[in-house]
Amino acid sequence: AEDLRSLLTQLRPFFSLIPKAKTAKIVRGIIDSVAKIPGTSELQISLCKEMVQWTRDEKRTFLRQRIEARLATLLMESKEYSQALTLLNGLIKEVRRLDDKLLLVDIDLLESKLHFSLRNLPKAKAALTAARTAANAIYVPPAQQGAIDLQSGILHAEEKDYKTAYSYFFEAFESFNALEDPKAVFSLKYMLLCKIMVSQADDVAGIISSKAGLQYVGPDLDAMKAVADAHSKRSLKLFETALRDYKAQLEEDPIVHRHLSSLYDTLLEQNLCRLIEPFSRVEIAH
């Protein structure tokens, strides 16, 4: 990662000789290569900051906006939400003036994710609507369309509209699956979550054993299957076991985690129903 970083610095004199579009492609390519190396988020942030400074000095606006958008994403991933928002607010005004629709879709989508992380749902929805509006005017690559659908699904699920959320997650899954993007497994996981939340836990096994589902068998799907089993058997004990066994997939996934507490309440209720079902009369003290 360090070598790639120094390569970007060494190439600067060369960048003044070649066309600007070519420069932009090389710079973004190198930053993408650094991103593939695990555990380099700090380095990526400082690299992006360096490049932003260089593009300002060289007056390369187009490239600078792309790198700033990348920097905002990295800041959001490092949970530096306020910094990322400040950066985005300036960037949005600039890009709207230039009317660069493709970048605008990216930035609006990022803003929506940021507001969602900060628990500001109205603003997250507004930013997502802006992203959709910009996306309707241009051709959007499938990966980006998938990202928009995924975010739509997450926001609908947050409002407890699981049926609509399911259809959005399904759209996102189709996009990512066609591209063999690792995000497909998350879309599939959230699809299963929606099924469980609308008490259709019996469909989960069917989705997992379908042709599309079989490609993604792994701890993420096992976790959802364990939760679905607990839901079908109306057993709080199984649910708690699933939470313990699949902590990384359930507790540490912010989207799933948000719905687990309401699922716990539903299961608690069903668990009590299951206990009193065999009786025609129940003494409350018992």
Image (tube, rainbow, N blue to C red):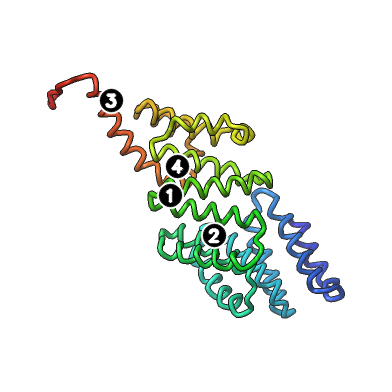
For label 1, the crowd category at 10 Å Cα-Cα, with few meaning under 14, some 14 to 19 and many 20 or more, is many
Q: What is the distance, in whole Å, between disc 3 and disc 1 at their CAs?
A: 27 Å
Q: Where residue 183 sits: x, y (%)?
A: 60, 46
Q: Earlier in the sequence, mark 2 or mark 4?
A: 2
Is 36 or 268 nearer to us in this picture? 268
Pointer 4 with pointer 3, Cβ within 8 A: no
Whether 41 is drawn above or below 136: the answer is above
Pointer 3 with pointer 1, Cβ within 8 A: no
Q: At 33% from the left edge and 34% from the top edge, which residue is drawn?
A: 267
Local SS, label 4: helix
Q: Which mark is residue 157?
A: 1
Q: Which residue bears the numbered disc 4?
A: 194
Whether 119 is drawn above or below 274: the answer is below
Q: Earlier in the sequence, mark 2 or mark 3?
A: 2
Q: What is the distance, in whole Å, between disc 4 and disc 3 at their CAs?
A: 23 Å
In the picture, the quarter occupied by the C terminus is: top left
Q: Which residue bears the numbered disc 3?
A: 274
Q: Which mark is residue 171?
A: none
Q: What is the distance, in whole Å, between disc 2 and disc 3 at their CAs?
A: 44 Å
Pointer 4 with pointer 1, Cβ within 8 A: yes
Q: Amino acid at mark 4?
A: Cys
Is 274 situated left or right of 132 in this image? left
Local SS, label 2: helix
Q: Amino acid at mark 2?
A: Met
Q: Which residue bears the numbered disc 2?
A: 76
Q: At 68% from the left edge and 54% from the top edge, which residue is drawn?
A: 35
Is 234 situated left or right of 72 in this image? left
